[in-house]
Image (cartoon, rainbow, N blue to C red):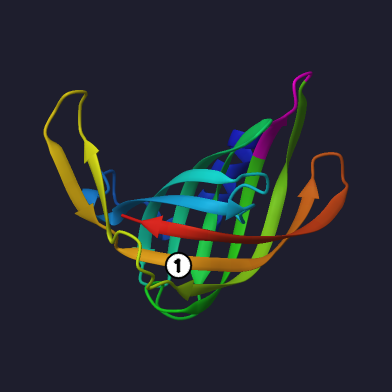
Amino acid sequence: MHRYFTLLLFSVAFPQLSIEGKRIPPDRWDSSVSYGFLSEKIPVSIIEFSRLLNIDEHSDFYLAIGSMLFGSGVGSGYKYYFKNKYTSSKFISLGSHILHLGSPGITIYGISISPGYSIIYKGKSSPKITYRKRFGGELKEVKYKKSAINIGISFMLMGDNSFGAIPFIYLERRF
């Protein structure tokens, strides 16, 4: 059900993404890693990995997977920046998520609307990431496209018709 809802939301709200049956160019895809207290992409996460489809300089779609001590989750959605996404800017995010919490297992799903502010971070930590495409392969380096501290609040409507609001603050590194 969650999968069909997300697909329906994207296809109705953003028909410009269909590129006449052609594959989306690889330069439109980014990845990001986030560390911090919760997130607008997945409400329960301390560390999160996301794949981002850049629509233009103000917006992108995301697919995210995140984890906390005794929980994990996945999320998808749309994020719009009121200024250019590579400058400090207000943003709003509309997303859906599903979470699995605890040892006996509680599953939570819902949708969220999250206004926030992205502050470009120019700290002294490393401006690049190192990785290997395959195990034992050549070590490669890629510079971060963006480092930002994101703060805001997520307003959520859960699957059992309950609602709530939780704050978030985290460091996001886009590469």
Residue 27, percent from left and from top: 22, 54
Name the amino acid, label 1: Ala
SS for callout 1: strand
Please, which residue is most extreme toward the top here?
Answer: 104
Q: How many marks?
A: 1
Which percent across, then down, holds residue 100?
69, 30
Position of 174 with respect to 78 (left or right) is left
Question: Quick check: is 99 in the magenta stretch?
Answer: yes
Residue 16 image offset from top left, x and y in percent: 40, 60
Residue identifier under label 1: 148
- Is 141 rendered above or below residue 16? above
Which residue is painted at 88% across and 47% down in the image? 162
State the residue at coordinates (31%, 54%): 175
Q: Quadrant of residue 159?
A: top right
Q: Which residues are magenta?
A: 98-104
Expressed as whole percent of the image width and height from the top left, the position of residue 155 reads 75, 60
Which residue occupies the foreground of this view, 44 or 127? 127
Residue 104 or residue 4, whichever sits in front: 104
- Relative to residue 117, is residue 61 drawn left or right? left
